[in-house]
Image: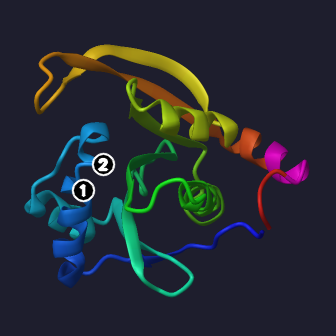
């Protein structure tokens, strides 16, 4: 079976109902900090951000991603958000690979980084397997919402351009 393919297209204001619904879905909400619709509008309009709809091979919307720091003078691009509706189909991996390529080849990133909630072990394993390195933890920095009261830590992970290029040379990144 071949790896799934995903594509990214710029988010339009008309996509925001979908964006908000997939973000608030009970399968996704525990792992992200929910944004107001106006925050998404800002990310679409702000030149330092890139807001994309993720589509499957049939061009159906399956999620969204947000990059920030796209004009950062230090060339440090943040994967602010990745939210996909289908789980366990390899779509997250396909999306992360496209985002790495975009960050390093089109945006000229020196560093591509993210933070992930400690309770999101599935995402942590994905990022590690895709070459991201844990840089540190922000202990109990986000409040849990819902039925559970307490805090979760954020794990900061990153990849440098030379690490990405080494993965490309080893054939670990798709062409």
Q: Nearer the viewer, residue 1 or 102?
A: 1
The numbered disc on residue 28 is 2
* Residue 95 higher or lower than 157, as above or below: below
On the question of residue 67 being in view, the answer is no
* Picture coordinates of residue 136, whole percent (x, y): 48, 17
How many other residues sit within 10 Å of disc 2, few (<14), some (14-19) or many (≥20)? some
On the question of residue 48 being in view, the answer is yes
* Residue 89 higher or lower than 115, as above or below: below
Point 51% across, 77% down: residue = 56
Q: Where does label 1 land, which residue? A: 23
Point 54% across, 21% down: residue = 135
The reply to whether the magenta stretch includes residue 102 is: no
Q: Read off the magenta span.
A: 166-171
Q: Secondary structure at mark 2?
A: loop
Point 71% across, 66% down: residue = 3
Relative side of 9 to 11, left or right: right
* Residue 117 higher or lower than 170, as above or below: above
Q: Name the image quarter holding residue 61.
A: bottom left
Disc 1 versus disc 2: distance between alpha carbons? 6 Å
How many other residues sit within 10 Å of disc 1, few (<14), some (14-19) or many (≥20)? many
Point 31% across, 76% down: residue = 11
Chain-order first, disc 1 or disc 2:
1
Q: Nearer the viewer, residue 118 or 26?
A: 26
Is the C-beta separation of discs 1 and 2 under 8 Å?
yes
Q: Secondary structure at mark 1?
A: helix
Q: Nearer the viewer, residue 89 or 151?
A: 89
Relative side of 129 to 45, left or right: right
Picture quarter with the N terminus: bottom right
Picture quarter with the C terminus: bottom right
């Amino acid at each position: 079976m071949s790896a799934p393919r995903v594509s990214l297209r710029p988010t339009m204001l008309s996509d925001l109902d979908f964006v908000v619904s997939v973000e608030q879905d009970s399968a996704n909400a525990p792992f992200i900090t929910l944004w107001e619709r106006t925050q998404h509008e800002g990310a679409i309009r702000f030149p330092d951000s890139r807001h994309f709809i993720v589509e499957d091979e049939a061009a159906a919307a399956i999620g969204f991603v947000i990059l920030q720091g796209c004009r950062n003078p230090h060339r440090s691009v943040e994967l602010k958000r990745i939210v996909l509706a289908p789980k366990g189909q390899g779509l997250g991996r396909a999306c992360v690979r496209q985002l790495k390529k975009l960050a390093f080849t089109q945006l000229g990133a020196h560093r591509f980084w993210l933070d992930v909630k400690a309770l999101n072990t599935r995402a942590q394993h994905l990022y590690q397997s895709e070459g991201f390195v844990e840089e540190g933890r922000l202990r109990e920095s986000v409040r849990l919402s819902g039925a559970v009261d307490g805090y979760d830590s954020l794990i900061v992970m990153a990849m440098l351009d030379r690490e990405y290029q080494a993965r490309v040379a080893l054939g670990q990144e798709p062409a």
